[in-house]
Image: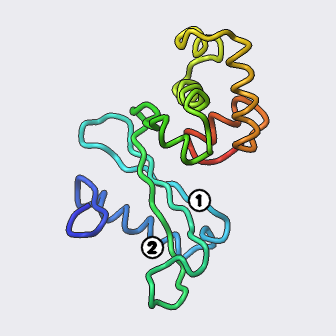
Amino acid sequence: MHKGALAGATASETTGIHAFVAGFFASAAHARGVRVHRVARPSGKRSYACFAHPLPPGSGVQGVRSAPAVIIFIRDPASACAFEPEALERLYDLTTSEAILARSLAQGLTLEDAAANRGISDETARTQLKSLFEKTGCHRQAELVALLVGGNRI
């Protein structure tokens, strides 16, 4: 962010980000949902992933007619899932144990490894997983992980 505007490390990256956002409104993408853009890193590491999600009508700036609005998420693909259990508890009305299990799964652990790391039985982990499914509306572990990591169910 530079002077209140999204900016890249170079002028061309900044131009690309601004075109990405402007293109979201110029196309029918806002009606279909998410749009994605890569932002290169000067270090040469994997590019940042920039996601544009439409906001519901009336979500824009107060006092402005219901112009289309978008929220931008930027994710570093090299970073691990950063959700703290407390955030997951609030987002999905989870118990602390369920939130810790959810984070472990989102970080790539198997259910059995997550149970072993916490010193609980596989059966207890399966019971907590079933509760996670009920509270998040997911039906499979992969669907739960996709929801936690990317905000979308598969």
Residue located beneath label 1 in the image: 34
Disc 1 residue crowd, few under 14, some 14–19, many 20+, Cα 10 Å: some
- The amino acid marked with disc number 2 is Ala
The quarter holding residue 95 reads top right
**In this rendering, would 5 be left or right of 48?**
left
Q: Secondary structure at mark 1?
A: loop
Identify the residue at horizontal 46%, vertical 38% (top origin). Answer: 83
41 shown above or below 111: below
**In this rendering, would 60 be left or right of 12?**
right
Who comes first in sequence, dot 2 or dot 1? Answer: 2
Disc 2 vs disc 1: Cβ atoms closer than 8 Å?
Answer: no
32 shown above or below 68: above
The quarter holding residue 68 reads bottom right
Which label belongs to residue 74? none
Residue located beneath label 2 in the image: 22
- The amino acid marked with disc number 1 is Val
91 shown above or below 21: above
Disc 2 residue crowd, few under 14, some 14–19, many 20+, Cα 10 Å: few
Identify the residue at horizontal 70%, vertical 27% (top origin). Answer: 129
Q: On the rendered image, what quadrant is the C terminus found in?
A: top right
Q: Residue lying farthest left?
A: 3
Closer to us: 49 or 149: 149
What separation in Å lies between label 2 and label 1 (alpha carbons)? 14 Å
